[in-house]
Amino acid sequence: MHETTKHDATKPRSHEATKHEATKHEATKHEATKHEPMKTSLLALALLALAADAPEATVRYRQSVMKTLAAQMTAMSLISKHEMTPSGERLILHAATAAEFSRDLEKLFPPSTRNIRSGALPKIWTSGADFAAHAKKLESETVKLESLARSGMTTAFGKQLEAVGAACKSCHDSYRQQD
Ligand code: HEC
């Protein structure tokens, strides 16, 4: 996705862009094709490309992804508290977006970014498997959230939204610089 953005700026009709559209198309069929091999390999390619990117850009990119996640959480929380009553499809869209951007979150923290000033604590890169486990926890909680969203706004959805929030907080408590 990142690779495509860079490409788009110079060559909007590039091969990359075409591939990207294919990926987006897959994403709309998300439920049916979640573990579809083609999609997985495109994603793996995108993440490989990420490792070769400038560390500064990777830091800004991951902060944007975090803000994307935060925006979905705010939107879903407004719906969950019945302050907003958009159609059920929007709830699914927010939950699916959270699930998509939660996938492989740990890969946005390559060791090359270790010395760039950011909110990421250095112990991310000495934690062994623990940091990745926190990322995987968010991934599984958001996948559950997405499937509940498909049943509409229910009490179970509200509870699961809290579980997702707890997964964000748990990682932040350990690995994010406190303000
Ligand atoms: C696996 C650990 C982990 C999980 C899970 C996680 N975060 Fe983060 N988050 C971080 C780290 C580390 C930073 C600091 C990143 C940086 O500054 O480069 C961060 C930064 C942020 C930021 C600040 C971005 C900025 O502009 O600098 C926001 C907002 C945020 N996270 C929201 C969320 C939300 C919402 C969730 C859950 C849906 C979440 N995060 C889940 C580790 C995590």
Image (spheres, helix red, strand yellow):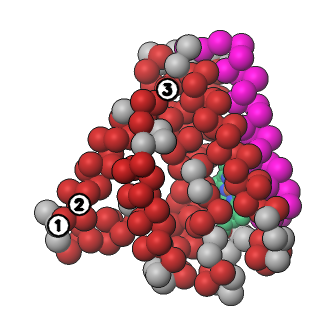
Q: Which residue is mark 1?
A: 14
Q: Is residue 153 above or below residue 45?
A: above
| Amino acid at dot 2 | Ala
Label total for image: 3
Distance in Å between CA atoms under marks 3 and 1 = 31 Å
| Residue 42: quadrant of the picture | bottom left
| Amino acid at dot 1 | Ser
Q: Are marks 1 and 2 in contact (CB under 8 Å)?
A: yes
Can residue 121 be spotted in the picture?
no
Residue at 56% across, 41% down: 99
Q: Earlier in the sequence, mark 2 or mark 3?
A: 2
The quarter of the rendered structure image containing the N terminus is bottom left
Residue at 61% across, 58% down: 105
| Magenta segment boundaries in residue numbering | 152-179
Check mark 1 vs ligand 1: CB closer than 8 Å? yes or no.
no
Left or right: 23 as drawn, with respect to 76: left
| Residue 168 highlighted magenta (yes or no) | yes
| Amino acid at dot 3 | Ile
Of residue 150 and residue 176, the one placed in the foreground of this image is 150
